Amino acid sequence: MAVPVPSSPAPSWGRRRVLLLNTTFEPLTALSLRRAVVLVVCGKAEVVHGDPAGMVVHSATSTVVIPSVIRLSSYVRVPYRGRVPLTRAGLMHRDRYRCAYCGGRAETIDHVIPRSRGGQHTWQNCVACCARCNHRKADKLLAELGWRLRVVPTAPRGPHWRLLAGVLDADPLWLPYLGEPAA
């Protein structure tokens, strides 16, 4: 069993995520830190980016850099991926945690066309919203209030959206591999 270096704080094995890339550098998924270390130790993956703090894990016979991004040694064929499911985390990430109406910090989700008026629960009808705007809008249409959306909501595209929707604290080192613009 590998143990962290005593001079540095122990990594959070259960919560920390590591980006897994295919041999073609296509993002596949976010793994637990423990699973990523096992793949590296078994020779099934290589470390592309290590921990920014330079943390390492020692065992009796080897030392492994704590990874942030790893790449598989052999190619894995990925089956067809359907549409990205609508989740709260994914929607907040898409809208960059900004209110679609005032631009403030978003805390809730709002249906542009309220569900009580036939609006659907889709990427095109849901936006991130601050509590104040959500309360003021209630079940009204934008035209009734004279409001406009700052950005037209669209469904996200690309394989990286499946990854980011489930990972709340994505490592900035992942951005070049996800096709995300540097923020």
Image (cartoon, helix red, strand yellow):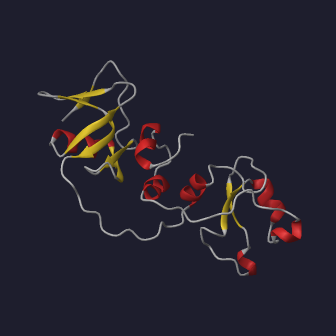
The percent position of residue 36, horizontal first and vertical second, equals: 27, 43
Q: Residue at x 88, y 65 (%)?
A: 146
Instruction: Please tell me whether residue 45 is drawn above or below residue 65 in the rendered image.
Output: below
11 and 157: which is toward the camera: 157
Q: Quadrant of the N terminus?
A: top left
Q: Going by the picture, which residue comes out furthest to the left?
A: 61
136 and 120: which is toward the camera: 120
The percent position of residue 103, horizontal first and vertical second, equals: 75, 49
143 and 58: which is toward the camera: 143
| Quarter-of-image position of residue 177 | top left
5 and 17: which is toward the camera: 17
Q: Residue at x 74, y 56 (%)?
A: 150
The percent position of residue 176, horizontal first and vertical second, equals: 43, 42
Q: Residue at x 24, y 62 (%)?
A: 77
Q: Quadrant of the C terminus?
A: top right
Q: Going by the picture, which residue comes out furthest to the top?
A: 7
Q: Is residue 102 left or right of residue 124?
A: right
Q: How many marks?
A: 0
The percent position of residue 111, horizontal first and vertical second, equals: 70, 68
Instruction: Please tell me whether residue 122 is drawn above or below residue 69 in the rendered image.
Output: below
